[in-house]
Amino acid sequence: MTDNLVDPRDSRTPLTLLGTGAMGTALARAWLAAGHPVTVWNRTPARAEPLGAEGATVAPDAAGAVAASRLVVVCLLDDASVGEALEHADLTGRDLVNLTTGTPAQGRARAAWAEARGARFLDGGVMAVPPMIGAPESGAYVFYSGSPGAFEEHADTLAVPADTRYVGADPGFAALHDVALLSAMSGMFAGVLHAFALIRREDIAPKDFAPLLVSWLGAMAPAAQTAAEQLESGDFATGVVSNLAMQVAGNATLLATAEEQGVSAELLTPYAALLERWLGEGHGDEDTTGAVDLLLRADRS
Ligand code: NDP
């Protein structure tokens, strides 16, 4: 039974990981646990040492780490730190996977930069926090975009820490999907803060209120699906259940309640003002989705 003698490391793709911060460490641990030979580098060496004790090879510099594996994953603070860390590395023949959060333009520029240095490039957007990495039931996934060949070749390895979602050859698309979801989340978090502020001075326990908030937001979330259908068809007026005129009137109640409760309306007013402008353009009988057009107008008026 020679199979038992085969070291799984012999059959797993070796990889290099630059950046052993919170996210990089979680990623490295997932690959190590799956038997991949992992070389790590971190600007502050002490932060890579625990991974050394867990079986990773710790490289003394970034260029040496890049030389150790054909597949190089980068998870640093921001795009500038990626440029800095890779400044003296030879990327010829490397597959560079950038899991550093950035903008779409940074993803595209970094792709051109890497390709000019002889590498294939994938940009990634991690939709998870570190404890979700390497936990198959957590719902963690990573958007990837860029070189289709590099994604195809490394799909199995990249799927080890979290599920993968390849969103196209345009290297800006991973960041665009990532940031679009984060932007929607930011609106949700703003709403949550405002809701807690409204009840804060009353005899309502936040822990009793929270389940109501969670289930309400969950019940409303599928509205995004309806909005998508309307944007696809261009029809914002058929089957509308809560039309714009009603929602603008409702917003007046939200703003008045904030005033009554002594809560700043600063998180509500931009959205209320946008919908009011759209109403002023005669869309009262429609759903609110068409207001996307206002956000796209160059003069924002
Ligand atoms: P950390 O702050 O824990 O780690 C940042 C890493 O970047 C460290 O390895 C740090 O090195 C390194 N770094 C910073 N500046 C430079 C530089 N100029 N040159 C070289 N290395 C540098 O952040 P995370 O690990 O949490 O985040 C890493 C990336 O993952 C970010 O882009 C983040 O947006 C993304 N991400 C993080 C999530 C999270 O919840 N943590 C969720 C989704 C994405 P040093 O130790 O020397 O400071």
Image: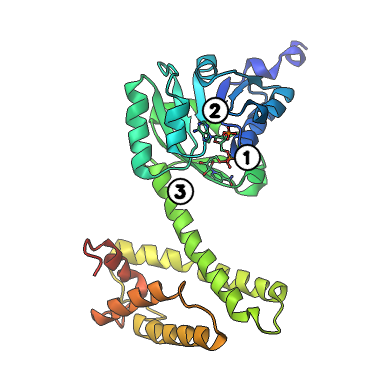
- Disc 3: which residue: 178
Q: Quadrant of residue 195?
A: bottom right
Residue with the most extreme left position: 299
Q: Give, as a three-letter code, the residue at label 1.
A: Ala
For residue 61, say whether it is visible. yes
Residue 284 position, x and y percent, is 30, 83
Sequence order check, earlier mark of 3 and 1: 1
Residue situated in front as seen by the camera: 132 or 85: 85
Q: Mark 1 vs ligand 1: CB under 8 Å? A: yes
| Mark 2 surroundings within 10 Å by alpha-carbon count, few (fewer than 14), some (14 through 19), many (20 or more) | many
| Mark 3 surroundings within 10 Å by alpha-carbon count, few (fewer than 14), some (14 through 19), many (20 or more) | many
- Disc 1: which residue: 22
Q: Give, as a three-letter code, the residue at label 2.
A: Leu
Q: Quadrant of the N terminus?
A: top right
For residue 151, say whether it is visible. no
**Element under disc 1:** helix
Q: Quadrant of the C terminus?
A: bottom left
Residue 105 position, x and y percent, is 33, 42
Sequence order check, earlier mark of 2 and 3: 2
Q: Nearer the viewer, mark 3 or mark 1?
A: 1
Whether tag 2 and tag 3 are in contact, CB under 8 A, the answer is no
Residue situated in front as seen by the camera: 21 or 254: 21
Question: Left or right: where does residue 29 sit relative to residue 16?
Answer: right
Identified at 54% across, 80% down, the residue is 263
Which of the labelled discs sits on residue 18, or is there none?
2
